[in-house]
Image (cartoon, grey):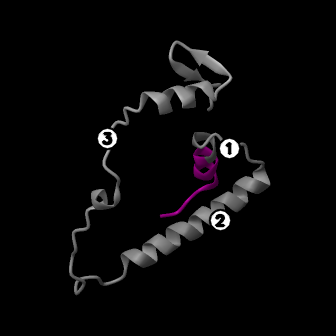
Amino acid sequence: MRLEQDNAAQCARMAKIRLTEEETAVFQREMQELFGWVKQLAEVDVSSVEETAVSRAAYLRPDEPVCDQALSSELVNAFNGRENSCAKVKKVL
């Protein structure tokens, strides 16, 4: 896949990154190099490699609610802003 400069600029816009023309050229070269590595990986013969099934869920903790009212109150009271029985925080984008 050949990456043109306008493609690199479009990728930067989609990522909400402002780049100068020089930075766009560097970004374009780096992305082209990355695509080259992916192409090399696609050429690797993996036909003799046995497939395995690994469940990532086995490494996650169970999603169980904690119903400790004392701990909940203590955590909410640690915040300066409170609304109803919840901690109020600034919007983070």
* Residue 54 locus on image (x, y percent): 26, 67
Q: Secondary structure at mark 3?
A: loop
At 63% from the left and 46% from the top, the residue drawn is 12
Q: In the rendered image, which residue does mark 1 sit on?
A: 17
Q: Nearer the viewer, residue 44 or 6?
A: 44
Q: Badge 3: few (under 14), some or many (20 or more) residues near its Cα, within 10 Å? A: few
Please name the amino acid that badge 1 sits on.
Answer: Ile
Tell me how far mark 2 sits from mark 1, CA to CA.
Answer: 16 Å
* Pair 2/1: label in front: 1
Q: Nearer the viewer, residue 5 or 26?
A: 26
Q: In the rendered image, which residue does mark 2 sit on?
A: 29
Say if 37 sits above or below 88 in the image. Answer: below
Please name the amino acid that badge 3 sits on.
Answer: Glu
Say if 51 sits above or below 45 in the image. Answer: above
Which residues are drawn in magenta? 1-11
Q: Secondary structure at mark 2?
A: helix
